[in-house]
Image (cartoon, rainbow, N blue to C red):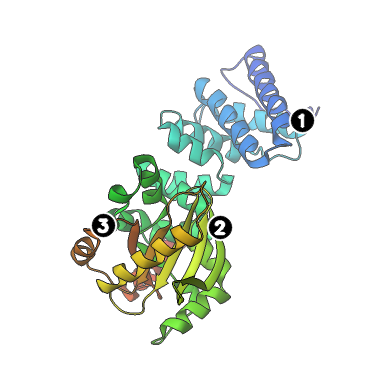
Amino acid sequence: MNDDKVAVPGFNEAAYKEILNQAIGQIHSARILIARQVNNSTQSVYWNLGKLLSERKLEEGYGSGVVKQLSIDLKNEFPDMGLSPRNLWDMKRFYERYYRADTKLRQAVAVLPWGHNLLLINKVKDDSSAEFYAHEALAKGWSRDLLLNAIKMDNYGEARKQVKTHNFDQTLPEAHAEYANEVFKSTYNLGFLGVTEPIKELELENRLIAKIRAFILELGRGFSFIGNQYRLEYNAKEYFVDMLFFHRGLRSLVAIELKIGSFKAEYVGKMNLYLSLLDRLEKSETENPSIGIILCADKDHLDVEIALQDINKPIGVAEYQLLLPRAELQALVMNELNATQQDNE
């Protein structure tokens, strides 16, 4: 072991060695799990180290010498881990931020990459929004930069404003309806298509098919693509579903119809027919009822509510955005410029 030592006023050698030995023990215990589940186990190490520092009541200032020496000794023992003093302090912040939090939030941040967690600690203060961003980042595979953009655009605030437009509560069993409500959103961002001018429905569909992986990420975790213009034949007639998916968690076929303009009530009748055909012709006995999503450029929730009132098939209506709204884009750019200017002052 390296003989480098840092003066630690107010801490005797025996007390320090106890902290060091406990820290080494935490890392050794977790390394068995790291081989099976690297990210989750690493977070567990960071959590336990943060807990150790917190319970020892070490604070930046008088505790800096202890943490600096701890970093030196731990890096000698585990040179492949990020155990700088700054990282150790961040582990303490991580533990103190979440140890009293709801179990769902703690489970969500436990499997996020460390860089994502540092971003949440620095940028998001309340538990409900932290849980929202953690779940979104996991479901959509967001990079750290995408997570930062989502926070700056206040995706959480926008999601809370949106009115859910579906009849899942009336047409699905309670537990299934609750899960479907979590899976489907009121608005989908299709900005990755690069649309800058008016576009026909078939062209929109073709662009989505060409970038189906990006579309599935926007839909969320659990979707498998089956096909587009999916053919259904019944009573010597043919019907074609724009896009057909299967959701593993819901165990349901999911039909998506794309509409260029605003929502119209007749779209619901057509979707209701498609779902009846899917349940009759395609759904297996072990699967749940098929679900329909009408994806349109604009919707009025009262119009949707009336249209769905007497429908017995689970249908949701969602909007899409082809471009980032200009006001949001300008605000995002200005916030970034102001932040950069403040950093340089």
Where, quadrant-wise, is the C terminus in this rendering?
bottom left
Q: Mark 2 points at which residue?
A: 143
Q: Dot 2: within a 10 Å radius of its alpha carbon, few (fewer than 14), some, or many (20 or more) residues?
A: some
Q: Mark 1 points at which residue?
A: 77
Residue 225 image point, x, y percent: 56, 64
**Residue at 46% from the left image edge and 43% from the top image edge:** 121
Disc 3, SS: loop
Q: Residue furthest top?
A: 14
97 shown above or below 284: above
319 shown above or below 87: below
Label 2 or label 1, whichever lies nearer to me, is 2
Can residue 343 be seen in the rendering of this structure?
A: no
- Amino acid type of the residue that numbered disc 1 sits on in the rendered structure: Glu
Q: Mark 3 points at which residue?
A: 163
Instruction: Report whether 292 appears left or right of 143.
Output: left
**In the picture, residue 13 is in which quadrant?**
top right
**Residue at 55% from the left image edge and 69% from the top image edge:** 227
Q: Dot 3: within a 10 Å radius of its alpha carbon, few (fewer than 14), some, or many (20 or more) residues?
A: few
Q: Are marks 2 and 1 in contact (CB under 8 Å)?
A: no
Mark 2 and mark 1: Cα distance apart in space: 31 Å
Instruction: Report whether 279 appears left or right of 31.
Output: left
